[in-house]
Amino acid sequence: MDRLALDIAHMFAGGLVLVSFMLLYQDRMFSLINIFALHAFVVSLSVAWQAHIQNAPHLYVTAAIALIVKALVIPIVLHRIIVRLGIHRNIETVVGIGQIMMGGIGLVALSILVMLPITAAEGTLVREDLAFALSVILLGLLMMVSRRNAVGQVIGFMSIENGLILAATGAKGMPLVVEISVAFSILVALIVIGIFLFRIRERFDSVDIYALDRFRGEQP
Amino acid sequence: MIDLGSFIVKAILIVPAAAAALLALLPDDRTTARLNVLGTLLTLLCAVALFFVRPEPSLFLIVDDVNVVFIVLNTFVGFTTSVFSATYIAHELETGHLTPVYLRFYHAMYQTLMFAMNLALLANNVGLMWVAVELATLTTVLMVGIYRTPQALEAAWKYFILGSVGIALALFGTILVYLGSSAVLGEGLEAMAWSVLVKRASAFDPALLNLAFVFLLLGYGTKVGLVPLHAWLPDAHAEGPTPISAVLSGLLLNVALFAVLRFKMVMSANERALAPGPLMVTLGLVSVVFASFMLYRRHDIKRMFAYSSIEHMGIISFAFGMGGPLANFAGLLHMIMHSLTKSAIFFAVGHIAQVKGTQKMADIRGLTHSHPTLGWGLVVGVIAIMGLPPMGLFMSEFLILSSTFSRQPTLAVVLALGLLVALGALLRHLNGLAFGDAQGSEAPAQASFMPMFTHLALVLAAGIFLPAPLVSWFQNVAGLLR
């Protein structure tokens, strides 16, 4: 394969990992959402580039979905929700940012160590793409466990989805089913944002999920 | 002439989908419950027809020996639960727990859930199976949160977060499977068709398969409720409407485990790949022991039976992990028996909680005096779930234990310990619930007893006598599972 094409694909995939790291240390609600929009933008660029070099026009659809829904609509909606609910204060993380970043670096190293030997038979493009994708997924998981806030968790989940899109487009010629399912997941995200955030607010005056943990239903 | 087999398979999917659309549109709350029952009955009839005509597998859908009984079980429990749900929901409307708008939503979601579970069982394409499991998760999340109490919202949120992380891991595993298979089979739909994967799995890269299976086991295992991925399960069971607890425990956990089994078959077809058994045995055993100790300190009746579901899913994973004709046979039998028994218990619990107005076990006493039919139904159900003779679960648990004793005595001792601890806990709680002086409301229950007693009769019948064709069919499938 053309050397330059490969390098550009790596740049986008590596860029996605970088933006995942940026998501980890955001401590303000609005900047978190902006960085997520950037995350989705990078993933759509990466998918579009894959569509170009693999000659797979249906992947452009996936790229367009990622761009329109995740980079534009969801961030704007979240922004509005936060303004309306008045919760744009700082968000607490469970542990310090330094520890989270160190953990993140460890996870990236882990995914590279796991993926590269296993995919030795595949082309360079697939190998490194998958290693990056697993890194993004693990970083998303790390973000979900390190946030107390419901919005933070939803964004963590959507960044995991971006990692999955990266993996699915990296696996050459994977049938359209995955694109359908990805569209599906976006629907899930929308439903959750719509229903849960409003109802959580309605009931608790807060989207801090620690408020939820009081109701364990376990008291005798 | 149209192909009858493929017509029936499509009908199993189209009937619930059409019913969901119809129920979402119809405003009247009287007929909708009946229409819901009618939809599930039609689906059940189509599923039974699969015993007689079976279509050729396509790249998307497949009917084989392994899934046909699960489809029939799924549609059967779906039907009986819809009968139970009709009376249950009527009571919820009367007491104002649910408004007609939510009722419409509930019925549409019920049929969508049936559609998703049938699709997951019928799917040949592993990607399609994933989509179906995701749809089933989404619908149950929405139904768990339907009462909109703080507890219900917390349960739904927890379920959503854990369920979707699990589902995400499963998708990554599916992508890895595709990667391994496309290197051998070439790109395209064939490389995702399970029937092709199983045949050609010996040529796949074992390292890729290993990693894929770990992701798939963790991903779908979250949906099965295996410890330590079970945190969503008790909350979701306790806070949602009881018919949903019944289908969650009886069907959805089975569907997720079925997905794991499909991939286990691919794994064991490749000799160089990691043996999937020990992983499943470990997770299963941990689940049994953990859940049986957790059973003691429960205060909420639905939560207690949710932990019992974790225990039984552990037993089933353990059995399939041990493998071999006998353990697989027992695992299959246990899956079916648990599904019937646990949904019957939830039918009883649903009416009990409604008539007593509480789910707290401390406030429910002496049921056999105040409500003899419900009380004794619960007693029989709990005896069955404890694995006491003469019920069907005794037979499957006995088979699992005896086959394990001959191969891995240490594991069998741990399993037996877990089962005994669970038995003690359930016995203790049952004693309080069913016997002694009656407490709380003694108003007669508006209940439909038919679904509960049909299930229990089937479980009893299976414990006493399994017909020969059924046994030979089980043996055949157990051989396929390896």
Image: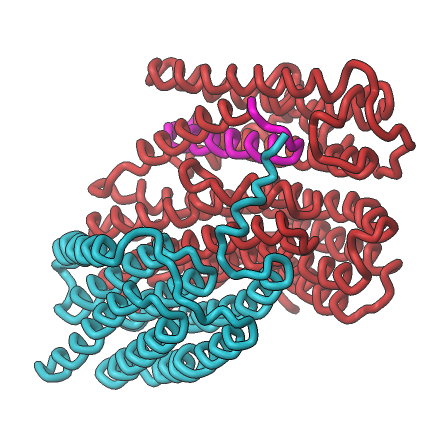
Chain colours: A cyan, B red
User: B52 or B429: nearer the eye?
Assistant: B429
Span shown in magenta: B296-325
Q: Is residue B195 left or right of residue B237?
A: left
Q: Nearer the viewer, residue A139 or A134?
A: A139
Residue B115: x and y, percent?
62, 58
Q: Is residue B153 above or below residue B369?
A: below
Let me know if residue B7 appears in the view. Answer: no
The residue at 85%/61% (across/down) is B29
Query: Is residue B301 placed above or below A117 in the rendered structure?
Result: above
- Horizontal placement of B445 versus B436: left or right? right
Figure disc tally: 0
Q: Residue at x 51, y 27 (%)?
A: B294
Which residue corresponds to the image point at 88% horizontal and 39% vertical from the top-left? B446
| Rendering coords of residue B376 (x, y %) | 79, 22
Residues A153 and A66: in front is A153
| Quadrant of the drawing holding the N terminus of chain B | bottom right
Q: Position of residue B277 (x, y in %)?
A: 33, 33
Magenta stretch containing residue B302, yes or no? Answer: yes
Tell me which residue sits at (37%, 61%) in the image: B192
